[in-house]
Amino acid sequence: MTITFLGTGASQGVPVIACSCSSCQSPDPKDKRLRSSIHFINRGKSILIDSGPDLRHQLLRAKIEQLDALLLTHEHRDHTGGLGDMRSIIYRQEKSIPLYAGARVVAHLEREFTYLFTKTSYQEIPNFEVHLIEYDAFEVEGLTVVPIRVHHKNLPIWGFRIGALAYITDAKVITEEEVDKMRGITVLVVNALQQEPHSAHFNLQESLVFAQKVGAQVTYLTHINHLLGCHQEVSKKLPSGIHLAYDGLQLSV
């Protein structure tokens, strides 16, 4: 399975508009972060987790012309704002894209993107084939996906275990029961927003503690804002086996 980080930034991306901090002014390409999203290719099938407002640019940059499934962690706009950009692929494929999300998320999308979920006279097929997810594992294009319940402050959202990889974003609280679902993974991807504590996200220290608890062979930190610091400087201080992800990073799992 080939994995590409399409975006590794938090809700404002990096650089942040009108900010003059060292991260935002950095010339290092690894400090240029679009909103968080990750893409999988497994046996020719193309799977996307989250579709933020940078999706058009991300798909063009990564030359992704096929999408066989979309998984959504939650409804916040930095994770769903690019939903309409998938229509070009839907038209090209001439088939709906299966969308896997919780019932609350789907209800929100149907209000926010009414035009994407309403039949029109000029479109013969629905844009999305909706599959509601709960706690049970489900199959996506030959892969078993295990939902992992995490809390984004008071908002319950989903992370996902797919094979030997677990993808967690926007987490602040994860119970021991949910951590147990990640035992034995090879790769952990988890949010590390910034240096200082935050009410709704792991900061860097909390992410490091969580990574140690999960015990994956390697951990990549994502959903990063400009207050974490520059990629090169932060990377020098990370423990062995823990790395900052960056836009365009590819892995084989």
Image: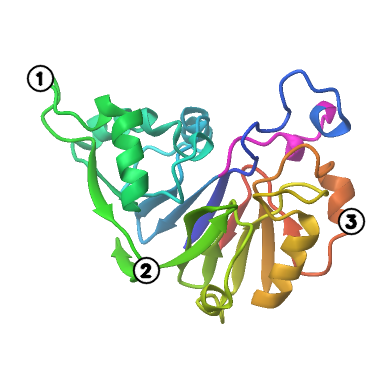
As displayed, is residue 24 above or below residue 236?
A: above
Contact (CB < 8 A) between labels 3 and 2? no
* 3 or 2: tag closer to the N-terminus: 2
Please name the colour scheme applied to the rendered image.
Answer: rainbow
Camera-side residue of 152 and 40? 152
Name which quarter of the figure residue 228 lies in.
top right
Q: Secondary structure at mark 1?
A: loop
Provide residue 162's location: percent of width, then percent of height: 45, 67
Position of the C terminus, as image quadrant, is bottom right
Task: Name the residue at 19% across, 40% down.
Answer: 95
Magenta-tinted stretch:
25-36
Label 3: state its secondary structure. Answer: helix
Mark number, residue 135: 2
Q: Residue at x 75, y 53 (%)?
A: 203
Report if residue 231 is visible in the image.
Answer: yes
On screen, residue 46 above or below 77: below
> Image check: 239 left or right of 187?
right
Label 2 CA crowd tier, 10 Å (few <14, some 14–19, many 20+)? few
